[in-house]
Image (tube, rainbow, N blue to C red):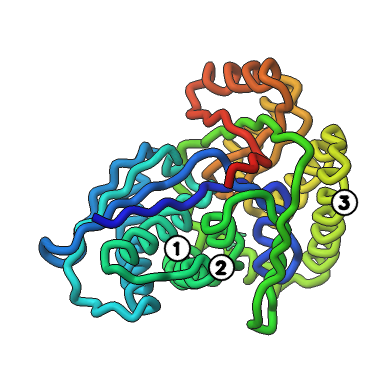
Amino acid sequence: MGKGSGYGKVILFGEHFVVHGVPGLVSAIDSTTDAEVQKGGKGIQIKDERKTAKGYSEEKRLQQLESIERMLKTMGIDPKISLSIRIGGTLPGFSGLGASAASSVAIARAIAQELGMQISDEKINQIAYEAEKAYAGNPSGIDNTAATYGGLMWFKKNMAGGPDKVERLHMRRPIEIIIGSTGKVANTKAMVEGVAERKKKNPEKYDPIFKQAENLSHAGRKALENYDLKKVGELMNENHRLLQEIGVSSKELDMLVDLARKQGAFGAKLTGGGGGGCMVALTPGKDLQGKVLSAIKYLGFEVLSTKIGVEKY
Ligand code: MEV
């Protein structure tokens, strides 16, 4: 049996903007998707044992099958191969945490091991990028990169098609965060397409917002490098406002963001594709993290308590 894992992630600055070449900041979180693959059976059989938001697996089923077809093609494997795939791990299937990219990385690694293929991380990343197209249409590559390598990263898509700019960053100490799930499964592909269409139709509105997003990513990087967490939080709030302006937030996301801030979070924003999915709140220290966690749980939303900047990767 072949085994493999991929990291979940939160985007701290720059989701959606990264698709258009704006740099973004992403951190892997302390949760992974794990896959086991065995040759045999009939066609591609998937047993998904992840904890998911309601309807997640059904909603993503077709995209998941397409992603595996793309993966096999990129790996040069006969598409008629029979494989039994089991997906599990500690990363919940909530939209926004890079669960699709983490599963693609995990499955590609497990397939490679089962078939005795030696594949570098660079190639795994490329396979997962191709697979990610099934879920995100025109992905930036930030999710598969975080899922493959883990850690904290500065990411800038190469709009000319060459290698993306990926810089590994280091933080003085890991920081506690809270992820709150709206419980709504989001269609990343539709969200990414929506932004691209609106941007094209209304450059007068969108171009200045994209410029602000770029400035924010740079300021966010600097604040993180200086470990100025108050500043990081303020900039995350600012980033959420820009995401609202480009039409990717939702009333549940805004509500969770407000709630986290009222409980003392240093900052909060939606994370990932939006339109549902998750919000991330910066909650340094166990006490603050616990307070924000309880408030969100109290309202009946699913919560994940984790850290960014963990360096075990
Ligand atoms: C999804 O996690 C992040 C998006 O920016 C899409 C992408 O970058 O591929 C919305």
* Image x and y of residue 256, in percent: 62, 31
Describe residue 297's horizontal placement relative to residue 49 as left or right.
right
Label 2, residues with CA under 10 Å away: few <14, some 14-19, many ≥20: many
Crowd around label 3: few <14 · some 14–19 · many ≥20 (10 Å): some
What's the amino acid at mark 1?
A: Tyr
Do callouts 1 and 2 mark residues in contact (Cβ within 8 Å)? yes
Badge 1 density bin: few <14, some 14–19, many ≥20, Cα 10 Å = many
The residue at 11%/64% (across/down) is: 42
Give how far across and how far down residue 200 sits, in percent.
70, 75
Report how far apart the C-alphas of labels 3 and 2 lie in the structure.
Answer: 24 Å
Ligand 1 within 8 A of label 2's CB?
A: yes
Q: Secondary structure at mark 1?
A: helix
| The disc label shown at residue 219, or none | 3
The structure residue drawn at horizontal position 63% and vertical position 71%, both measured from the top left corner, is: 197
Q: Which residue type carries mark 2?
A: Pro
- Disc on the earlier residue, 3 or 1: 1
Nearer the observer, 193 or 104: 104
Q: What's the amino acid at mark 3?
A: Ala
Q: Which residue is mark 2?
A: 139
- Residue 135: mark: 1
Where is residue 132 drawn, in percent x and y?
A: 47, 65
